[in-house]
Amino acid sequence: MPQTAHLFGQDPIVITKRIQREIYDTTGINASIGIGPDLFLSKTALDVESKHSNSRIAMWTYEDVSKKLWGIGTATEEVLHGMGLFSLKDVAKTPKELLIKRFGKVKGEESYHFSYGIDESRMANKYILKSISITKGQILLEDCFSHNKLKMLLLEQIEETCFRLRSFAMIYNYNSNFRISSVLRPVNFAISSIGIPFLCIPRINWIFPCLIPSSNPSSRA
């Protein structure tokens, strides 16, 4: 915000309330906003505090980190507890070399820096995707045992996915390196899937027996 103070003012709370009002007037949505000296603290202020406050605004500084934040997963938390570390304040007091030795260079340094609320990433840095995945999912309201209904559902999903591909102008020639993967997740959490090269909308009558063999009693009409 210091770089834009000449445009919007000095007080971050005043600016944030103005943003909230503009969002509400435009969309009718009550926005939650986190404020901090870097991306990490502003994001965690949003997740941990602002969503639960009456104003839906939270501003964190580096002094707030050891008091308010514990953003470690369960597995990492257990390891830290085994090292005698029970808060981010404990992590901050631990030599960085010890954390690197225990968690590796990347995670060790990240844990050390995050314990101080330090995040050196910049929003201006562009992230280049190695691959792009376009998906379409649907949760049925009830169990479906009809082959015909399931064929119809699969065809709708495939057609919608193909439409999205065309919308993003990602298909430029007939032999593009795309694959369609149709996946069924029954209530027993078993997964049936098949991947085929993307040339056109596939024939559903060919895909369907591969996903649900006719010998499966639960899949019969």
Image (spheres, helix red, strand yellow):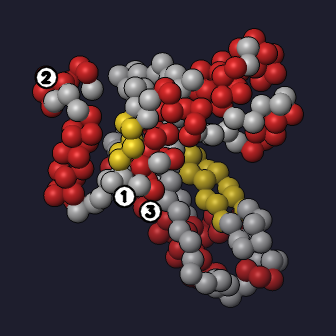
Percent position of residue 139, x then y: 56, 72
For the residues bearing labels 1 and 3, Cβ distance under 8 angstroms:
no
**Numbered disc in front, either 1 or 3:** 1
Q: Which mark is residue 88?
A: none
Percent position of residue 68, x then y: 56, 40
Name which residue lies at 73% across and 84% down: 220
Percent position of residue 177, x then y: 52, 37
Quadrant of image for the N terminus: top left
Name which residue lies at 56% across and 51% down: 180
Circle 2: is it few (<14), some (14-19), or many (20+) Cα within 10 Å? Answer: few
The residue where tag 3 is placed is 159
Quadrant of image for the C terminus: bottom right
Q: Viewer-proximal residue, 35 or 24? A: 35
Q: Amino acid at mark 2?
A: His
Q: Which numbered disc, 1 or 2, marks the residue that appears first in the sequence?
A: 2
Name which residue lies at 72% across and 62% down: 192
What is the spatial separation of the Cα atoms under label 3 and label 2, in whole angstroms? 50 Å
**186 vs 128: above or below:** below
Q: Which numbered disc, 3 or 2, marks the residue that appears first in the sequence?
A: 2
Answer left or right for 32 relative to 211.
left
The residue where tag 1 is placed is 54
